[in-house]
Amino acid sequence: SLSERLQGVFKKLRGKGKLTEKDIKEAMREVKVALLEADVNFKVVKDFINSVTEKALGQEVMESLTPAQQVIKIVHEELIKLMGSVESRLNLGSKVPAVIMMVGLQGSGKTTACGKLANLLKKQGKNPLLVACDTVRPAAIKQLQVLGANINVPVFTMGDKVDTADIAKASIDYAKSHNVDVVIIDTAGRLHIDDELMEELVRIKEAVHPDEILLVADAMTGQDAVNVASSFNERLDITGVILTKLDGDTRGGAALSIKAVTQKPIKYVGIGEKLGDIEPFYPDRMASRILGMGDVLTLIEKAQAAIDEKKALEMGQKILSKQFTLEDFLEQLRSLKNMGPLDQLLAMIPGVNKSVLKNVEVSEKDLKRIEAIILSMTKEERQNPSIINGSRKRRIARGSGTTIQEVNNLLKQFEETKKMMKRFADIDKDLKRGKLRL
Ligand code: GDP
Ligand code: MG
């Protein structure tokens, strides 16, 4: 697989100390072959390799990473960029009902995706309606009705004799009088792209002005999926892609090329035949999956972005030598805040007790109060919190405009953070010792 191929390339790099320009170029040649074999679009591969090579050659030396790790880091970042950097969500606009139109070739998974999406939206408290606009395939209407019945979502149909643009239009009227807030239109597909199909879809589009036109593409078809996405995008100006059948033996090429070729994001992925088998598309997770290194990679990325490496190391040493003070704690809270949702980050650290997460979550407001409390302490108290007895707590609470309870909470949080920082320090150590391999 692509993942195995790439890991093979990086393994070779790992054996070397300092990487030369020749090493990097050689590795990039192998990455290139691996990507092409995974059916990634040729032009996308070329741009990707150029950009990674340039960054790898020009990179600043980061003390905490080996040269091989630095190359992996760059490849990982570029993979994420390729797939769209930020995750992208349904954009349902403001008019009611919102309209989602599903398009794609026959067998790509449109009808199934309609059901999956309706199911998701219903769980989010929406009131969706499925609309049967595939009047070509004899069993298509029945298939949608069965799906609808399964998830208790109504299905709008006018049989197979009525013009599909008229059906779509009528479904909007129905939605308005039946308290429906999202209309999901299933459409016909063909085995190949043809003018008749495209014209029909354009007419439906013009009849109902969808908020989302989602192309459903089969990941198993690799390059073809990308070509299909291009053609549909040219005719319909799609808003996004649902990439199906990622549970199968796909080579990853479609996921990597679609965004770069069409400039339209992958919004969801289908990972099985059942109605629950759908996930939002996360470029960073997909990149990690392709590199086969899991969430540890994400954790390190975020930690590096937010904490100056040297400082983190000093901090780790302080914790180990039990000198970690409330002043360090405050500094740490400030830098942790830059990393984004703290609970998400902490959940990725192996061995962190999830029940602790609640207590270390920090909001902007919390941070202000914590600051006030710590600043109301004497230097001695900040360095050695164990001396903070009842009367000191009362004084600190009064001085910071908080309560004794809050001072207690802070001291508890401090102890928990100390434990957590020790995990960070351990991970850092393991990385340096090569026990935790990237
Ligand atoms: P349509 O012709 O585009 O409407 O495609 P369908 O929704 O009828 O799906 C065609 C086939 O693909 C069906 O057998 C589905 O169960 C299957 N299918 C759809 N999505 C997925 C998926 O994400 N994973 C897998 N393994 N099968 C899927
Ligand atoms: Mg169908």
Image: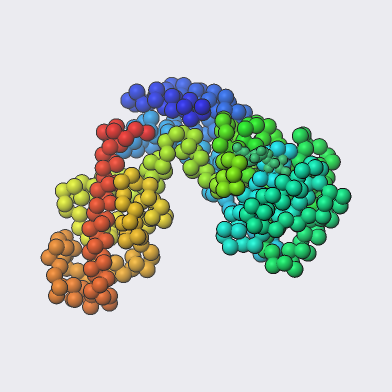
| 21 left or right of 206 in image | left
Image location (x, y in percent) of residue 18: 34, 26
Location of residue 135 with respect to 402 vertically, above or below? above
Comparing 397 with 360, the one in front is 360
Q: Quadrant of the C terminus?
A: top left
Comparing 413 with 182, the one in front is 182
Image location (x, y in percent) of residue 349: 34, 46
* Total count of labels: 0
In terms of image quarters, where does ligand 1 lie? top right
Image location (x, y in percent) of residue 190: 77, 37
Q: Residue at x 39, y 34 (%)?
A: 70
| 49 left or right of 383 in image | right
| 420 left or right of 23 in image | left
Asked if one can make out residue 37 in the rendered structure from this viewpoint, the answer is yes
Location of residue 226 with respect to 18 vertically, above or below? below
Image location (x, y in percent) of residue 211: 69, 56
Quadrant of residue 241 within the rendered picture: top right
Asked if one can make out residue 231 in the rendered structure from this viewpoint, the answer is no
Location of residue 163 with respect to 392 vertically, above or below? above
Quadrant of residue 229 within the rendered picture: top right
Q: Residue at x 76, y 57 (%)?
A: 156
Tell me the colour scheme of the image: rainbow
Q: Residue at x 31, y 46 (%)?
A: 351
Q: Residue at x 19, y 76 (%)?
A: 394
